[in-house]
Image: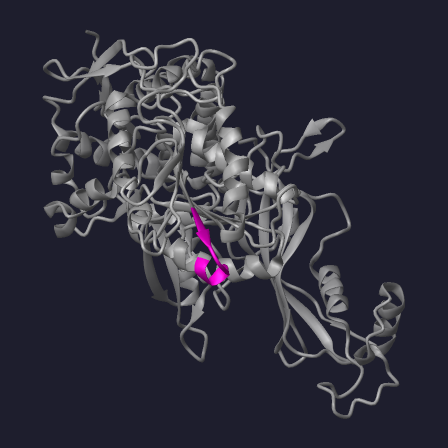
Amino acid sequence: MQKLNNYIQGKWITGDGDGQLLFDAVNGNPIAAATTRGIDFKAVLDYARTVGNPALRKMSFQQRGRMLRALALHLLNHKEKFYSISYKTGATRVDSWIDIEGGIGNLFSNASLRRKLPDDFFCLDGDPIPLGKQNTFMAHHLLVPNEGVAIHINAYNFPVWGMLEKIAVNLLAGVPAVVKPATVTSYVTEAVVKEIIASKILPEGALQLLCGSAGDILDHVQSQDVVTFTGSAATGIKLKAGEAILREAVPFNMEADSLNCIVLGEDVEPGKPDWDVFLKEVKKEMTVKAGQKCTAIRRIFVPENKLEEVQKALIPLLQKTIIGNPLNDKVRMGSLAGNEQRNEVKTQVQKLLASSQLIYGSLDSVSVIDADAQTGAFISPLLLQNENPFQSSEPHNIEAFGPVSTLMPYRNMEEAIALSKLGKGSLCSTLVSSSPALARSYTLGAASYHGRILILNSECAAESTGHGSPLPLLVHGGPGRAGGGEEMGGLRGIRHYLQRTAIQGSPTMITAISHVFQPYAKGNTTEVHPFKMYFEELLIGDQLITEKRMISSDDIDKFAELSGDHFYAHKTNTDFSGTMFDQQVAHGYLIMSMAAGLFVDSFEKNPVLLNYGIDELRFTKPVYPGTRIYIRFTCKEKIAQETKDMNANMVYVKGMEIPKGIVKWYVEIFDDTDELTGVGTILTMVQMKNKI
């Protein structure tokens, strides 16, 4: 029997011994064997730390983001190969799309986050913190990549998405990964990793693959490592309690299967659009991936006066589900991942039947097309009903990881919230309702027990990603039974692989360390106007102090006429008693406009292409007629913009693309007394001499 390969320490190897046989879930035929016997797991982790980690740390966030994008494009070009293998797990085309293209989509989404990060291997976290009255002492928080390795132990139901959604985050952060997929479907993961390695897009040591047992790998973790686990809560708890995990204080992120729920709002009536949205969502979540999703709907809560109507409407929809060989275009639900999983589902359903009744489906038979119901791991969708959910613990404690869900009644929203919490923490929950009051009540009442809440109705249904779809820019995880962990979440996700360190010192020193100009730091006054410098020539701290300009009452009047802003404080004839002002005051935007006139070098063409925007603009002191203002204009931060991305702020001049970057300028506006009257950050797009 052919063995799957493990990719470790820069080469593909097979483990020792016969290994575990893996079977086609549709026809029961053996596919391959998987084993990691004989592998030195300590050496695998050391290789990631000493080879992969330094290579990734040398790269900036921008470079890592472009690397992820290149990898996503490469895998997208080979997706059909992955689809042809994924069918063997029992997945339909739609199931595989969620796994394969959903995983690749994670790479794209995380790649796009580079635009929110500096062109360096580390970043700042939060705002500067002044610590002294004389502004000579301050603090900030720094985020640097961990010097360890991310160890991902994944579940069988998403062999591609489960890997890609995790490594996208740690690679962007600058940390390598060792991936250990669930053995039963690891042949799909192996195929994807082969393409990743063959592409040579990732630096060596950035990714290693183990197809088989995790062995004693967790005995060799160190304090700079991060472990993530997706699977059953029982297994996760055992792994999390490992001696090395506890001794080294290794972060352990667990995402466990949970008893997620959907609630039909009391405002939803049969025959209305929201009614159909509800039924469609329940059916989809029961049958997609044959219910083998950690986010699948396990508990269905409906108003007690609509219980019978929901039952009558939902059963015909389930009856229309065509089950069988996923290669058949007519099939809408494939098999479970294997016969062991089918036996496990049946065992769990028997436990649920202690307090519930089966109202649709059969544990013993299922009608399939283009397949053998017994040879393949097929099972019928199973809809249960429990009429006493507060007196029955089983629906809230026992999960059958397949196309199984239990229908239960509630009397009011308070009961619906209480029932949702009986699951003791879940990954997600959905309320179907068009009532803002019910949406607010349920969300705020149930949020502490759920990692994500979807408010679904006909208004958003067409664009909704659905109850069971974790998104890369949203956190994925949940409290309690769901594991108490959190992953993805856009920029939040990468922080799991970065060490947050508080740094203290003078503003000048914090500027030197962070490569971001801090208020009150010493600037670099230059003979050349900053606007005459190309992106590469500008240095953080390059500074211009302008001449002074007087603000007159006539200036204020003219700006009021030009802008249409005749706010009472800008008029000369206003009675200012009882107001915050002594006399006519200049518009804040007039001050900002005059500031631009003072610092902009506008007499000839220069590398500044355009004004890109203003951040954090504040007006701190009134400016009255007769006041003379001047500007301190400082290069605060630089972010390169690659020219290869057709969607990233492309600029054309006479058909030619211009290489460019974003420069942030710290603008301080002072008056005659040298007091600050306004402060903000202006962004300009500045030409580069060379393309990235």
657 shown above or below 459: above
Horizontal side of 600 relative to 691 (left or right) equals right
Pinpoint residue 334: horizontal percent, then vertical percent.
41, 20
Q: Who is closer to the viewer here, 104 or 309? A: 309
In the rendered image, which quarter contains the N terminus? Answer: top left
Which colouring convention does the figure follow?
one colour
Q: Residue furthest top?
A: 1
Q: Residue 657, located in which quarter of the rendered image?
A: top right
Q: Residue 565, located in which quarter of the rendered image?
A: bottom right
Q: Who is closer to the viewer here, 477 or 404? A: 404
Determine the residue positioned at 16% across, 19% down. 35
Query: Is 414 in the magenta?
Result: yes
545 shown above or below 608: below
Pinpoint residue 441: horizontal percent, then vertical percent.
52, 62
Q: Is residue 476 visible?
A: no
Determine the residue positioned at 30% across, 45% down. 355
Please give the count of numbered marks on the rendered protein: 0
Pinpoint residue 387: horizontal percent, then vertical percent.
40, 49
Query: Is 325 in the magenta?
Result: no
Pinpoint residue 608: horizontal percent, then vertical percent.
67, 45
Q: Residue 217, located in which quarter of the rendered image?
A: top left
Numbered range of the magenta stretch? 408-415
Horizontal side of 616 relative to 205 (left or right) equals right
Determine the residue positioned at 23% across, 22% down. 211
Horizontal side of 330 relative to 486 (left or right) equals right
Horizontal side of 680 relative to 216 (left or right) equals right
Q: Who is closer to the viewer here, 145 or 95? A: 95
